[in-house]
Amino acid sequence: MGLVLQHILRKCLLFLTLHYFLTQCVSSVQRPCLDSERSALLQLKESFDLDQFASASTSAYPKFDSWKLEGQVGGDCCSWDGVECDDNTGHVIGLDLSSSFLYGSIHSNSTLFQLHHLRKLNLSDNDFNDSEIPPAIGNLSRLSQLNLSYSAFLGQIPYEVVELSKLEILDLSGNDNLQLRNPSLRSLAERLVNLKYLDLDGVNVSSMVPQSLANLSSLTYLSLRSCELHGEFPNEVFQLPNLQILRASTNKFLQGRLPEFNKNSSLEEVRLTSTGFSGELPETILNLKSLSFLGVANCSFSGQIPSWLGNLTQITTLDLGLNKFWGPIPESLFNLVNLHYISLEGNHLSGTYKLESFLNLKNLKYLQLSGNKFSLLTTPVMNVTIPKFTILALASCNLVEFPNFLSGQDELEFLDLSANKIHGFIPKWIWGLSAESLQALYLTGNLLTGFHEPTVVPPWTNLQMLDLSSNKLQGPLPIPPASIYRYSVSNNLLTGEISSMICNLPSISELDISNNSFSGMLPPCLGNLSKSLSVLNLQSNNFHGPIPQAWEKGSQLREIDLSQNELNGQIPRSLVNCSMLELLNLGNNQIEDTFPSWLGRLPELKVLVLRHNGFHGGIGKPESNEFPELQIFDLSFNKFEGGLPSHHFQRWEAMKVVDLGKLYYLQKNSGFQSPTTSWAYSIPYSMTMTKAGVVTKYEKIQDALVAIDLSSNRFEGGIPENIQILKAVQFLNLSNNLLSGPIPSSMANLTQLEALDLSQNQLSGEIPQELTQLNFLEFFNVSGNQLNGLIPQGAQFGTFESNSFEGNTGLCGKPLSKKCYPDGTSPPSTSMSQRDGGGDSWFEFGWEAILLGFGSGVVNGLVLGYYFFDPMKHKWLVSLLYMNYG
Ligand SMILES: *[C@@H]1O[C@H](CO)[C@@H](O)[C@H](O)[C@H]1NC(C)=O
Ligand SMILES: *[C@@H]1O[C@H](CO)[C@@H](O)[C@H](O)[C@H]1NC(C)=O
Ligand SMILES: *[C@@H]1O[C@H](CO)[C@@H](O)[C@H](O)[C@H]1NC(C)=O
Ligand SMILES: *[C@@H]1O[C@H](CO)[C@@H](O)[C@H](O)[C@H]1NC(C)=O
Ligand SMILES: *[C@@H]1O[C@H](CO)[C@@H](O)[C@H](O)[C@H]1NC(C)=O
Ligand SMILES: *[C@@H]1O[C@H](CO)[C@@H](O)[C@H](O)[C@H]1NC(C)=O
Ligand SMILES: *[C@@H]1O[C@H](CO)[C@@H](O)[C@H](O)[C@H]1NC(C)=O
Ligand SMILES: *[C@@H]1O[C@H](CO)[C@@H](O)[C@H](O)[C@H]1NC(C)=O
Ligand SMILES: *[C@@H]1O[C@H](CO)[C@@H](O)[C@H](O)[C@H]1NC(C)=O
């Protein structure tokens, strides 16, 4: 009863006269809450579990705790937490159960839908356990505010939503896999004509943006990020008179241009990052007197950066990154004193600028200039106040030294100075810069030779990412701080043994010390790291001795690359504990073992490379379900013997199905989270294998690549007919073995073959005419066999040269001379060359994929690329995203 009185009193204070008190309040004392609605609310309460993991907000608490029956009248439900009643009628008109730890399914029979008088409903930030939004929502026809954001709803948004014609606020953002198909966005826009606020971030709308959106004249807020929109964005939407916030980021196939803006526009924020918007920035942007946020990164805008942008003095965020802008940075930009965030990264801007000019923007926290064509001059900075940066990205800015103003920066979270020309020692003051805040430091691709104080463990307490790769660092392996998550020193001149201190890094997930001159034995404790390690790359060093034995159960490892060392002994059987392993590369060592068929039990293994070792013996019988995901299998240059493993072919499911791939690369998608920021990036897997007769280093491996290399062993017997079962194989190399018998015509069914090398065997008979059906075959080599008869003619066979066929006494026809006398024999030589493993598509697809694959895919629209130089493509690639969840 106390609560009821309190509630009434609170309301009554609003009324100033006693008269009012008597007339209005007495009536609400008589009818505090309707029995039927109280009972509906109580049943609603009963239908959910409380689970503190159901809500993410730090201010979440169980509002249901105050929902109980009290006294004789049963309690005034109008006083319950989150419940709002109409003063006159007592009906429940508002229900705010956001962030209330609700967990459980919700259906149309829920008593919630008996609360017909509801005008506001907020169920945001709970976990409705992948329920669909119940169609009975349509019964709540008085609703003007509906907020179901971030609540794990799934499936089709029910058609009944369009019956809520009084809706002014509709927020369905942040639900994985919600779809807006029927109703479509168009019917929503045509029926919900009173909308002021529409947020569909992350909903799969998968349609054009309807013209009818431009009729919603009350709209102030429109957010359609990550909605799979396509087609042309209607210009009229920009011109909605009341629109303040417009967000359409992360809709790759959405086209559009910025319109001419007029003076009465209310736009404050325009976010179009990662869309197909193109054209130039119109000067009428200056008419947007309230515009504070312009985010058009990763679009297709072009032209020079207009100097009039400097007149947009009220702007705080200007993100022009990752477009095709060229020419100089206009001086006028340095007038934008309110800027908090500016990104010009990844354009083609040129010229030479003083870093100081940017430091005059006193409010700047985020400065991203990486990946252009200009040079930054560092001058010793005068005794002036300098902005304290959070994010500073100055990759490939032709810096020759560490800018000295950095020494006063103690709030940095991200610092990227990679791909500059900074040389010499890393000064002591860098080693511990922003000691408490720094999360990621990139110094890769400079000319650094060492450290001033190498032995001290650096004092960073939150550093998770440290990349010192591709420098000229000498001396022993520097040990990173205990907070480290990813650590790379690859491509340096480091020497000495690996200290077992490396095993005292509790959080390390990715360790890359490849391409150095480390020596000695691997510390046995490396295996113990496998609970946290997911990537271990020790490739191309001088390690010797055995592979560490103790790989623990529960291992997180996905990539183990120990190739190009001098490791010997056997493969430790405990590797089978690495059940998430996708790539195992032990190539170019001195391992002496029989075929490790037990590795077939690794359910995720995609790449197995054992080339150039001392493996021996037969392949043996297959296990019942082995290598289900295997797509790259390289046993070349060993001493395997016996028949080809034809019984195994049946088991290799991934090689049996042609998957055109998604144009991704095999990689580990990775990331870590700080309180303010999500960091995401990918680590592409690499390998070396023989491709079309040439030893090729693949810096990246396309996800659809299927290759088998059994060359340079002692395999004997025939090529099994059933090899045709491996329909997805693109590269097949059986050369330099003791294979005999005919080439099976069934190989014509390997329709994806691009390279087929059967050279240097004892194959006999004719080359099957059917092989001309192999439309993708670019490389074919049967030299050094005992084949005879006519070489198949036509199709791809018209493109092969005579050395593909030489060394077979009985072959005749083009490209050989008709008389079938080959002129001289020269077996294919193996030469080192570096060739590209794939196309340009990683940039376009892999990057988007990470963005979409991360969380709900809804990000604030600020993107930070980390640039690294791809020696294969001679271009800069973006590998890191910075996502600031709003
Ligand atoms: C959540 O959904 C799963 C799968 O449909 C179901 O098994 C489980 O019982 C549901 N939990 C609750 C609390 O509704
Ligand atoms: C409500 O409907 C769901 C699904 O139709 C059903 O599983 C559940 O038992 C129903 N609950 C009640 C209280 O009738
Ligand atoms: C919702 O409305 C439908 C008709 O549109 C009706 O059949 C149903 O009983 C109503 N549900 C509730 C809970 O009032
Ligand atoms: C929906 O509710 C959440 C609280 O969980 C809030 O942050 C968000 O702003 C609300 N949406 C609208 C449109 O008010
Ligand atoms: C719930 O959503 C409504 C809008 O739908 C909003 O006004 C209200 O502030 C939200 N509640 C909370 C606690 O954020
Ligand atoms: C979105 O919906 C379309 C059409 O149903 C579908 O093709 C696409 O795969 C969906 N996207 C996602 C990410 O689920
Ligand atoms: C920008 O501002 C300068 C000085 O305030 C002014 O002279 C110039 O005309 C303005 N330019 C535009 C395009 O408005
Ligand atoms: C810089 O300013 C600080 C205080 O603002 C002062 O203590 C210091 O002496 C100045 N240094 C120089 C070189 O002027
Ligand atoms: C290719 O496969 C089909 C069906 O599996 C089979 O009928 C055909 O004979 C095969 N072709 C050759 C050349 O073996």
Image (tube, rainbow, N blue to C red):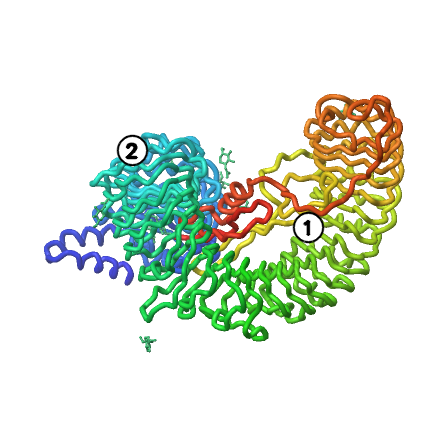
Q: Residue at x 26, y 49 (%)?
A: 312
Instruction: Write the residue at 31% across / 46% down.
Output: 269
Above or below: residue 670 compared with residue 360: above
Residue position marked by numbered label 2 in the rendering: 236
- Residue 431 to residue 248: above or below: below
Q: Is residue 620 visible?
A: no
Corner quadrant of residue 625: top right
Amino acid type at mark 1: Leu
Q: What residue is pinned by disc 1?
A: 583
User: Does label 1 or label 2 sit earlier along the sequence?
Assistant: 2
Residue type beneath disc 2: Glu
Mark number for residue 277? none
Q: Is residue 596 left or right of residue 156?
A: right
In the picture provided, is 338 more to the left or to the right than 648? left
Tag 1: Cα neighbours inside 10 Å, few (<14), some, or many (≥20)?
A: many
Residue 152, percent across and down?
A: 46, 46
Tag 1–tag 2 contact (CB < 8 Å): no
